[in-house]
Image (cartoon, rainbow, N blue to C red):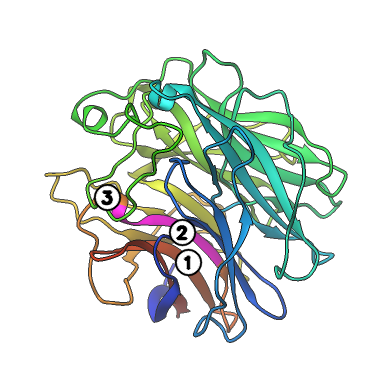
Amino acid sequence: MAAALSITGSGVVASAPAMFSAAVRSPEAIVVAFSTVADGWPGGEVRVVRSFDGGREWTAPVTVARPREGEASVLGALGMVRLTDGTILLPYNGVHWTPGMGTAGRRLSLNLARSRDGGESFETGDPIDVDFFWPAVYGQILELDDGELLWPIWGRQTESEKWRAVVLSSTSAGSEWRVKSTIAFDAHARLHGTYVETGDTGAEVGADTQESTHDPSFRPHDPTDGVTETTVCELADGSLLAVMRQQGVGGDQALTFITSRSLDRGETWSDYEPLAFSGMSPALWRLPDGQLLLASRRHAPEESGIEPGVEVRLGTADGKHWESPITLEQPDGRRPASEYQCGYPAIVPGGTPDAVLVVFYGFDEDTGRYLAWNEITLRP
């Protein structure tokens, strides 16, 4: 790979509180959804903004989803897609907290908002039941050439197990869903040590308590381990590639990304393999020439000497070889001071064939987490 990536523009999408982005591009606008709190901490909403000029100006946020009765929050991340008929699907979770139990008492409902007018308005229906105990939304929905939709999620299929990554399938334009296959699972995954012990497990969270999104030290942690945030991309040859965040899979303590492949449209997956680098909140994107982009949050534990940030790297068309990354820039020129002050990139086409827009959250010392964008251009 002789080409290189460079940052050719940046800007602000939405002011704080804004994080956990999802994005699509229609012929008229860039549509970005985001959450107002991290990890479903109580009080969260899902909101949408749009830009009609390539990201320079954005509409005022519109709330798409609020907690239902009995829920404390709603949360989305990455999964939004624009189908070939123009319909936009926006996945999100409803989150119920049992006071006094921390993350162990957190329960999720699986939801899908739908827009038929380019993201100007969204309809929400009843939660989707796929016989999965703890379904967390994440990966972008894929639309295959025969109309089948594949929706990567992660969580616990049964109450007592570790986390796993699965793909849901719909052959009814998203009206009905089923679990099609497990992408990766390790029944014995375990993350331990200082990194776990210093995370916030939500022990003091109650139904009427909100996360302080401007708190620079906030770092959530769920003691469950396994395979988590999963992004799936259809490669130029029609196969599928999954890149997954993990906690303690195979005994690994470095949060090394793992990958798996499917040659039969998601029916079965290869044994997972590690990549040569670690990270969180991965997002895969296929460029017009078949090469891949992987955007992710850098794993930068305190006192590790690693600079926190969101990075983007170029990969070969088969996803087997990856270049060194470039670090995304906050529009104000500052750098995040800690790992969880940034992350969750979403990718849409840029204004030219050799460019993409990456939307991610950064951190402002006065207001907290907000959404920014960088234009990334592929240079020969």
Residue name at image x 60 percent, y 16 percent: 158
> Could you tell me the amino acid type at mark 1?
Val
| Helix, strand or loop: magenta stretch | strand
Q: Which mark is residue 95?
A: none
Q: Which residues are magenta?
A: 341-347
Mark 1 sits on what residue? 359
> Could you tell me the amino acid type at mark 3?
Glu
- The magenta stretch spans residue 343: yes
Residue name at image x 23 percent, y 33 percent: 195
| Dot placed on the residue nearer the N-terminal end, 2 or 1 | 2
Residue name at image x 68 percent, y 50 percent: 141
Mark 3 residue crowding within 10 angstroms, few (<14) / some (14–19) / many (20+): many
Mark 3 sits on what residue? 339
- The magenta stretch spans residue 312: no
> Could you tell me the amino acid type at mark 2?
Pro
**Disc 2 on helix, strand or loop?**
strand
**Disc 1 on helix, strand or loop?**
strand
The answer to which of 152 and 369 lies nearer the viewer is 369
Q: Which mark is residue 345?
A: 2
Q: Is residue 129 above or below residue 25?
A: above
Distance from label 2 to label 1 (Cα)?
A: 5 Å
Distance from label 1 to label 3 (Cα)?
A: 17 Å
Q: Are marks 2 and 1 in contact (CB under 8 Å)?
A: yes
Q: Position of residue 37 (x, y in %)?
A: 43, 50
